[in-house]
Image: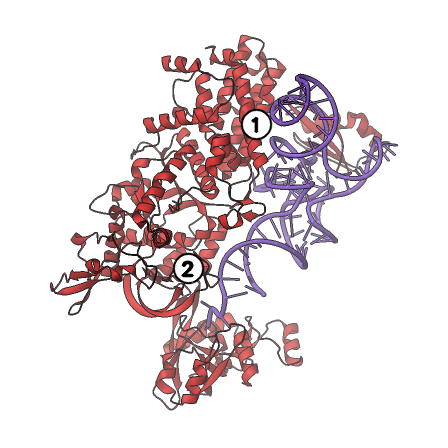
Chain colours: A red, B purple
Amino acid sequence: MNQAHGWRRNLEEKYNAQCIETKWQAEWDKQKLFSVKEDPDLPKFYCLEMFPYPSGRIHMGHVRNYVIGDVITRYKKMRGFNVLHPMGWDAFGMPAENAAIKHGVPPAKWTYENIAYMKEQLKKIGLVYDWKREVTTCSPEYYRWNQWFFLQMLKRGLAYKKASSVNWCPACETVLANEQVIDDGCWRCDTTVIQKELEQWFYRITEYAGELLADADTLSGWPEKVVTMQRNWIGRSEGVEMDFRISGSDMKLRIFTTRQDTLYGTTFMSVAKRHPVIAALVRDEEILRKINALSDDPEEKEGVFTGWYAENPLTGENIPVYAANFVLMEYGTGAVMAVPAHDQRDFEFAKKYNLPVKTVIMPDTASDRAVQENGPPLSVAFEEYGILVESGKFSGLSSAEARERIADFLEKEGLGRKVVNYKLRDWGISRQRYWGTPIPVIYCSSCGVVPVPEHDLPVLLPEDVRLSGRGASPLSEAADFVKTSCPECGGDAGRETDTMDTFVDSSWYFLRYCSPESNGKPVNPQDAGYWMPVDQYIGGIEHAVLHLLYSRFFTKVVRDLGLVDIDEPFGSLLTQGMVIKDGAKMSKSKGNVVDPDALIDRYGADTLRIFSMFAAPPERDLEWSDKGVEGALRFLNRIWAFVYKNRDILRSGGSDQLKHMAAYSPRASQLLRKTHQTIKKVTNCIERDYHFNTAIAALMELINETLSFSPSDSDENDLLRFTVKQVVLLLSPFAPHFSEEILRETGAGETLFNHAWPVWDEEIAKEEEIELVIQINGKVRAKTMIRAGLDDETIREKAFSEEKVQEFIKDRSPKKVIVVKGRLVNIVI
RNA sequence: GCCGAAGUGGUGGAACUUGGUAGACACGCACGGUUGAGGGCCGUGUGGCGCAAGCUAUGGGGGUUCAAAUCCCCCCUUCGGCACCA
């Protein structure tokens, strides 16, 4: 209490945000309010925002993301949850390396300086984290576990090396995973990606394709859009694999199809340019030359006859084998049976090269069939399901049934088998860059590929590497790093010089927060058991299939390693919209950035927070408005001025026991009712879907009403104190410094966040009087105030007794009268 | 091309979950007050048309209903995702 008294004398007339904010930030830091530990007696809540790359400065996108998380954290804490809210740094990556090349600053120095600066920025926004759990992915304490995971995955066959055609970004001079290629461009710099043949390390994410797809159904707290994107990315399809014998050779051509019902309509075969069968069988130099020259233009279907024929195992027909530019080596078997009548691509191809088109599926509605039978020749393929014709013993079946029967038949006859195919490819994790986790593998000329023994971890990233920016894999030039001895034979050996994709780092950081100091294992199963899964995850939609898919995969692997017992890492996901200014995403290149530091200096963090939460609901894009920011400040100023004006009343220690509604004047009871209604509304807005904009609007309404209230006796003083206190508590997640400061004025000796969230009384919140709307033929003709809870008959009478209503009705008799309780009467005449 | 989301005042947005007064809240604007002036602050007004009674209005068209921003069908526009996946 004494402390509070000391503060009271300092109440300023003008709201001075900067002064208040520094004070409370220091205080929260000192009290370590959001430093948490596992407590099985409390309900837990794990609130997480996607950690930033330490690029140098916090931008408005970060601010929005982190304020959303901070509001939820503070709200949940007041609701009695044990809230874990950690923060860290996604600190490996190219910008540090580029800065080094450009300015000669060592990447580590550059990164750690950025982190220090950005951490201060986060504190200035008033964000509260459990900083003792901070993780920095470029520190050996963190990345050693990337290496540990790699070794476990290697043991289980989940990490492997293979040569393949990979996506290469010429600007970043490194390989990219499939997920990291957006519209043929690099996800980071947008440079057009080219294909390159390279030997690379992969994580076998396809091993989990089925589970990742099946468990997508359990992500009920995720935006449907994100789940759909993941499902499409995984791209499951059911079909059959079968072999076509190549006539005149002992080779077989294995194909994959989902449309085995169209098998009898196969009139040729298509294989990818690089299909091994070409190298094995085609001897004619001219044909090989033509195949090589096939264009990659997706618009123009092109092919070359290989000179070979294949035999349809069902019909015995011999059909030509083409190399075609639209057949992908990476999907299925790299070869397809071509059914021009029922596949648009094959149709176009057949037209171009004069190949036969054989209809084997008829539409199953009579009228469509008539059109097809009597109409002009097909101009497009009929790709739908229908009824089989000209298909031997399967004729007459529906496509759906035929797919089953033909698949069964092929299996029985040993001609093929049912398979499930995925579009998802394994995750290429090798990067020819310096600033990342060294892949813990050693190459020995006599033992081959040898994993670094676990007890030798971490394989430290050398810090004194010269970065020229030319050529790949800077580590290969670090002789001291490369040169090592083989753990198996002790002979001279060399280290792997590629580093890991930085998406590996972010695929499990949320687990590390649960037990940041865990030593023998990356995660302490008990702590993770308490905190996981993340209850609310917040971040940008751009990670819909990148980080979010990798994290789901990693979680399943970590589960199978026995470290956690959950299947999915993120219970609920909120994808916040972009911050827009002048119609475009804020970016340096467009010159429309707003600097958070400058705003805080000018308006204070609370104003920035209020505006960010008020201008739009979290999932929508937020249009920046300088005027809107001023409006947010005005809102706080008005409250402040009112509190200052009434400071004597608010300071006086009256009774906390409010009178019954009926004992107050209408004016005062209205304020009491509005207060309870506001508690209800704000709570519901947050609970239902985190629509903070409407929560703040409700608070503004209450404030507008409170400002015109001047108490006239001690009961009304008590009421005023009550209302102001509720306002401050409801406002506190959004404007915490401001609220904390004013709360002391209403006599609290303790920090906000040890206060409980306000509760409303349904009885008090209930309106006594309602405005009855009277419609005639659906148009509003009159309004009148009536007591709440009247029965239909009375309401009806009230409506008819309105003069306005009588005027409209005159002598006509109403055909129908609809009474909606507590709302309106509609008279139909 | 396929899939998805969204279209409401001058602007950001509310009401869509549960059909029931469209435009909460804020920005802007206008007028008035305060002030030496400006800014700031306070008050009043503010979808459109009309002096008014009233009419009209949620991208466009149709439908269901006593009643539709809300439900159903068709179309248009914008944004996002996927794009030869056999």
Residues tagged by mark 1 and mark 2 found on one chain of the structure: yes
Q: Nearer the viewer, residue A405 or A564?
A: A564
Q: Is residue B23 left or right of residue B2?
A: right
Q: Residue furthest right?
A: A811
Give the quadrant of residue A442: bottom left
The amino acid type, in three-letter code, at marker 1 is Arg
Residue beneath the point at 36% across and 25% down: A27
Would you say residue A760 is visible in this rendering? yes
The amino acid type, in three-letter code, at marker 2 is Glu
Marks 1 & 2, CB-CB < 8 Å contact: no
Element type at mark 1: helix
Compared with A782, A269 (above or below) is below
| Cα distance between the residues tagged 1 and 2 | 46 Å
Q: Is residue A346 left or right of residue A472?
A: right
Give the quadrant of residue A753: top left
Q: Which residue is mark 2?
A: A179
List x then y, in percent, for residue A596.
47, 38
In this rendering, which labeled residue sits more in front, label 1 or label 2? 1
Q: Residue under mark 1: which chain is it in?
A: A
Figure quadrant of the C terminus of chain A: top right
Which numbered circle lies on residue A634? 1
